[in-house]
Amino acid sequence: MRVGFVGKRARLDGIGAARYSCEMPLEPYDAVVTSLDNIGFHEAGITGISHENGTIWLHLENVHFGEESRYAVVALKGVRQIRRDGESVSEIAADHPDGEIIHFGLEASGAVMLIVEWMDYQPSRSCTRAYEIDCADLEIEKGAVDNPTNVR
């Protein structure tokens, strides 16, 4: 599994160290990125989900990059399998209009584990879903503090 940052362009290949390839005109990271430790997804809102050619894009708000809360797009590339609550599914789809990330992390197997609470405030309903996504690559595009159009 490669973990990369589009825009910030630090990539992590397997367990090795990250390398830079500054392809976008955004400020570079101050340090080599070797994990998701400085990125907080807890309580980040899902503003959109799209699927295309084996890639899932999660459009998010309130992702914490250190002390900053920003918009972001997470691209899960080369998706081989998605399991929702242990059952195989073809895509990630919202159960209710509002989605909040409870947990986002990498499993020992290399799969991405995503736990989302889906809420509908009008009739006051919610459900929590656990997704395990087997994919080849993970890229995170860091967006603006106040403008989601600055990311994909």
Image: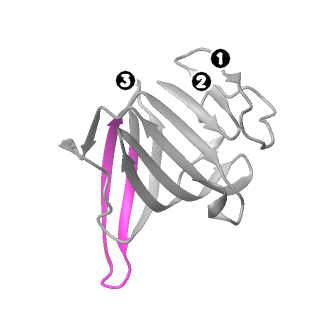
Most common secondary structure along the magenta stretch: strand
Name the residue that disc number 3 marks: 109
Name the residue that disc number 2 marks: 12
When the figure is inspected, residue 88 is found, relative to residue 31, above or below; the finding is: below
Residues packed near mark 3 inside 10 Å, few (<14), some (14 to 19) or many (20 plus) = few
Residues packed near mark 2 inside 10 Å, few (<14), some (14 to 19) or many (20 plus) = many
Inspect the image, locate mark 1, and give the three-letter code of the amino acid beneath it: Ala
Name the residue that disc number 1 marks: 17
Q: Measuring from the top left, give residue 56's x and y in whole percent.
A: 40, 45
Q: Is residue 99 left or right of residue 125?
A: right
Report the residue at 68% width, 65% height from top: 147
Q: Is residue 76 left or right of residue 31?
A: left
The magenta stretch spans which residues? 114-133
Q: Nearer the viewer, residue 67 or 15?
A: 15
- Secondary structure state at the residue bearing disc 1: loop
Quadrant in which residue 83 is drawn? top left
Mark closest to the chain's N terminus, 1 or 2 = 2
Report the residue at 60% width, 29% height from top: 35
